[in-house]
Amino acid sequence: MARIRRILYPSDFSSASRRAFSTAMAMATSNGAALTILHVIVPIVPLLPEQAFDSATWQRVDTLVRRRGHEQLTRLATRARKAGIRASTLLMEGDPAQHIVRASRSTKADLLVMGTHGRRGFSKFFLGSVAERVIATAQCPVVTVRGR
């Protein structure tokens, strides 16, 4: 098996992602690997008429979402660095599965470690599975960690 030098850990900051972070840190530590922590902002699609919110309101929401993303990424990177792991962060916007795969290529990740919500039935049908789409299209091995 090839040596694991670079690990990509995508997070949506959910409980499933928190469990996967522990796994990603343990794997980074045991392999002496660098850890890239990724968050993908899903664009907000207004469900109300455009007149319900003005552009300034949408701009404030966007700013808050980005700020929260940066803060959470910084918190995770700090935690990893305190554990002696070389950590960096990425913040992207768009379709999570596409950007996770894209980031795995651009960072030349040897391994991807991500959480999964383990949805089944109707919720999976309507919400889809980011993990499934990543597994199907990633060029590197993917470790999934179930959230519950």
Image (spheres, helix red, strand yellow):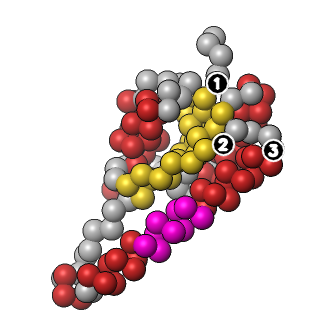
Q: Quadrant of residue 74?
A: bottom right
Secondary structure, mark 1, is loop
Q: Is residue 43 above or below residue 148?
A: below
Secondary structure, mark 2, is strand
Distance between mark 2 and mark 1 Cα atoms: 12 Å
Q: Is residue 132 visible?
A: no
Q: Residue at the location (53% across, 29% down)?
A: 109
Q: Residue at the location (40% across, 77% down)?
A: 61
User: Which amino acid does the dot numbered 1 rest on?
Assistant: Arg
Q: Which residues are magenta?
A: 63-71
Q: Is residue 79 magenta?
A: no
Q: Earlier in the sequence, mark 3 or mark 1?
A: 1
Q: Quadrant of the N terminus?
A: top right
Q: In this orientation, which residue lies closer to the viewer: 60 or 40?
A: 60
Residue at which label 2 appears: 87
Image location (x, y in percent) of residue 62: 39, 72
Residue at which label 3 appears: 83
Residue at which label 1 appears: 5
Left or right placement of residue 79 versus residue 143 in this view:
right
Distance between mark 3 and mark 1 Cα atoms: 17 Å
Q: Residue at the location (55% across, 33% down)?
A: 112
Q: Quadrant of residue 59?
A: bottom left
